[in-house]
Image (tube, rainbow, N blue to C red):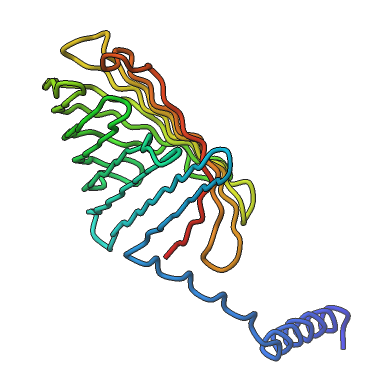
Amino acid sequence: MTSGSRFIASVAFVLFASQASAQATPPPPTAPPAPTPRPVTGSAQFSLLQTHGNTDTSIYGLGAEIKYKGSSPWAIGAKALLNRGKVNGTENLNNLAAALRGSRAIDDRTDFFAEGAYAEDKYAGIDSRRAGELGLARKLAITEPHLLSIEVGFGLAHEVRLPGKTKQDFGFGRGGFTYKWVISKAADFQNQANYISNLKQTNDWRFTNLAAVTAALRGKFSLKVSHALNHLNTPPIGKKKTDSIISAALIAKF
């Protein structure tokens, strides 16, 4: 056999052996498919503070949030928050906030939304506030650990102030952002801020900010420590411009 023939035979043997080895080696296991997102998600939270002795204090807070997002571009969500408090048997905290939002995805990062909201804060001088808003939400950062989205909207509000139940109707513009830092699989930090401008009285602007750290406990339960700030530049008569609440709450997710 010539050297050329031996080379061709050697190459053919190597190729045959490689093919036989590849056929003998089992293919790597296929990764399991990603779980399908549940269409309904939500959470409920509860906070409580009680003291007895020189001062009897009782403060509790309730909150809930639910969202439906199926395979269509439409989504709907609702949330509500209630706080009540007494010192020595006299109520000094009474506020309520609720909102219902429907949205439609325009693309992977942009949503159009319509929202209706209701609020009460008796001891801040707000007997009731009703508002309807249309706007756009845009996701700027979608990769963990840092997530960021912005919103802009315009709407109409009907507000009743205490004392005397003075009524006012006005249009408003709102700009805001939501930032989330995923610290680890068990903890995250989130901040949501909004600036609201009264288009009828420009000095009557409002600012809200909610910052919270959430840490997983066990199963579906988490602990959340938050700081909420509400600023009214022209508050009701006899009231301060800024209110803030620091709270710790137990959260159950579903």
Residue at (70% x, 91% y) in the render: 24
- Residue 78 place in picture, x, y as percent: 27, 51
- Residue 232 place in picture, x, y as percent: 33, 19
Quick one: 17 or 60, which is closer to the camera? Answer: 60
Above or below, 240 relative to 28? above
Quick one: which residue is furthest to the front in this view?
54
Above or below, 169 relative to 14? above
In this image, 224 relative to 131: left or right? right
**Residue 111 position by quadrant:** top left
In this image, 18 relative to 252: left or right? right
Quick one: 74 or 34, which is closer to the camera? Answer: 74
Q: Number of callouts in the render?
A: 0
In this image, 4 relative to 120: left or right? right
Query: In what quadrant of the picture does the C terminus appear?
Result: bottom left
- Residue 86 place in picture, x, y as percent: 41, 40
Residue at (45% x, 38% y) in the render: 87
Query: In what quadrant of the picture does the N terminus appear?
Result: bottom right
Quick one: 143 or 58, which is closer to the camera? Answer: 58
In this image, 237 relative to 92: left or right? left
